[in-house]
Image (spheres, rainbow, N blue to C red):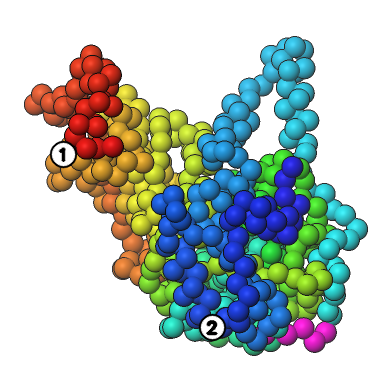
Amino acid sequence: MAYSDLREWMAALERAGELKRIKIPVDTVLEIAEITDRVSKSRDRQGRLGGPALLFENPKASNIPVLINQFGSERRMRLALEVDSLDEVAERIRQFTDMKSPQGFLDKVKMLPMLAEMGKFFPKTVSTGPCKENVHHHGWDLNRLPVLQCWPKDAGRFITLPCVITRDPRTGKRNVGMYRMQVFDGATAGMHWQRQKVGAEHYRESLRRSVQAGGSEAQVDIMARTGGGSQKPDGQLPAGKMEVAVAIGTDPAVTFSAIVPAPPDVEEYLIAGFLRGRPVELVKCETVDLEVPASSEIVLEGYVNLDELRSEGPFGDHTGFYSLADLYPVFHITCATHRNNPVYATTIVGKPPQEDAYMGKAVERIFLPLMRLTVPEIVDINLPIEGVFHNLMIVSIRKSYPAQARKVMNAIWSLGQAMFTKCIIVVDEDVDVQDIADVTLKVLNHIDPERDIQFTLGPVDSLDHASRLPNFGSKMGIDATRKWASEGFARPWPDEILMDQQTKALVDARWQMLAKELGLG
């Protein structure tokens, strides 16, 4: 049975010995972050990396406990999604994507169970929920929340694990994204949606409509340049507002769905329903026309002005470096609701491994089948944690024609968030991309650098501080596949050194005795 809310998830963590409670008072400014950073990089008695989830029961300056590092290990990500292996979720996705049009009555009958299961995933709106136990139309102060300052040069305190809900002005489709929010004061916060994010596109579309109602082409240009925040606005932007809701402390499937690279027409609430095997219950907000998960611990309702940008940052980011200050919209609170005795869920990012690393690896495994829909020759991918997910992708392929590796690179650079990948390495299908030692050996032996490395220009992640311009820079692809005569390679390609199976079997049969004599245990 899926977790219905954050509290069921916390109870499951505690039963599994994966949650530790800290009762002593701890400061939300830097101290919680330093403790969590050490824990996230520690190992348990079995040598497993990640450390436990932490519940700080007495944060200084707030009576609301802080939950952090809830997804901070591979085992907890599996527990969150209730699977023994993340590949189980990938297999479920593959089964749905493999569905073919029924050819006759019998085929249609066979599809009924799967169609019935799909019907369970769609969200449903209910009249009320736990998040409405306390409603504050006036006087709510953001400073009541135990919001963390994580790193010394951060511009202030940041909400780091919010599910930010917006609505497409054109289609009415909802989006749930995760964008950090710098607390400016008790009633406002920065809304750091990078220009390539869906929330930023909803903002730009709202701005376009406001411009069309009375603005100028120059204002459209200003909108395009400032939607993700990189240029100082020259003149007054058109007036207007865009409604936003922020849910903090949701069940693990909803929280995880906010970071997944969903197909454009698929709502994150539907993805969460798919992951949890039952629908997400939603309630309507009090002051904005949006729906939020009914079991959320805390909900902030409000809007961003279309004529207001403010400097946000610096912020110690998942790259291991500070992202610089830039201009972003400002979120204004109109109402806050919360459960009785709410829990504040948060995270820190910084030099890996951190909690976000395991969430990212889960995305890698789960959405591999969707990548294969577009690039079917892909066998496996690896986004190494140290590559912070947009700096390096290692891809193995079934190569069947010349220059196919280069075709795959360009295909990946055209796929949603994968377009930001700075370096792509393509290897043959017999290379284990999860084994970095094997990849290193094969790649460095297989390439002629001048022949096999290509460069291209295009959009890059907003957090890439090395690019020549914000959001625009170069990318590198490495073709480390075996080279064929049809690719202009005239020399023989050598065989890899491998022991024959007969000798391996002979030594396997005697290995226990030999290992004892050799003192190998």
Q: Position of residue 258 (x, y in %)?
A: 62, 56
Q: Is residue 59 left or right of residue 354?
A: right
* Along the viewing direction, whichever of 124 and 402 lies nearer the viewer: 124
Q: Which mark is residue 285?
A: none
* Along the viewing direction, whichever of 41 and 360 lies nearer the viewer: 41
Secondary structure category for the residue under label 2: loop
Q: Residues within 10 Å of mark 2 (few under 14, many from 20)?
A: some
> Which residue is situated farthest in the right direction here?
127
| Picture quadrant where residue 245 is located | bottom right
Q: Is residue 415 visible?
A: yes
Q: Which mark is residue 29?
A: 2
| Picture quadrant where residue 43 is located | bottom left
* Along the viewing direction, whichever of 239 and 93 lies nearer the viewer: 93
Kind of residue at disc 2: Val
Secondary structure category for the residue under label 1: helix
Q: Taking 72 as reference, is 468 above or below it?
A: below
Q: Position of residue 314 (x, y in %)?
A: 45, 80
* Along the viewing direction, whichever of 351 and 18 lies nearer the viewer: 18
Specify which label sits upstream in the sequence, 1 or 2: 2
- Residue drawn at x 41%, y 52% is 47
Give the overall secondary structure of the magenta segment: loop
Magenta segment boundaries in residue numbering: 138-143
- Residue drawn at x 46%, y 75% is 34
Mark 1 and mark 2 residues within 8 Å of each other at the beta carbon: no
Q: Is residue 70 left or right of residue 321?
A: right
Q: Is residue 200 visible?
A: no
Kind of residue at disc 1: Asn
Q: Taking 500 as reference, is 270 above or below it?
A: below
Q: Position of residue 87 (x, y in %)?
A: 53, 36
Q: Which residue is mark 1?
A: 445
> Which residue is situated farthest in the front direction here?
517
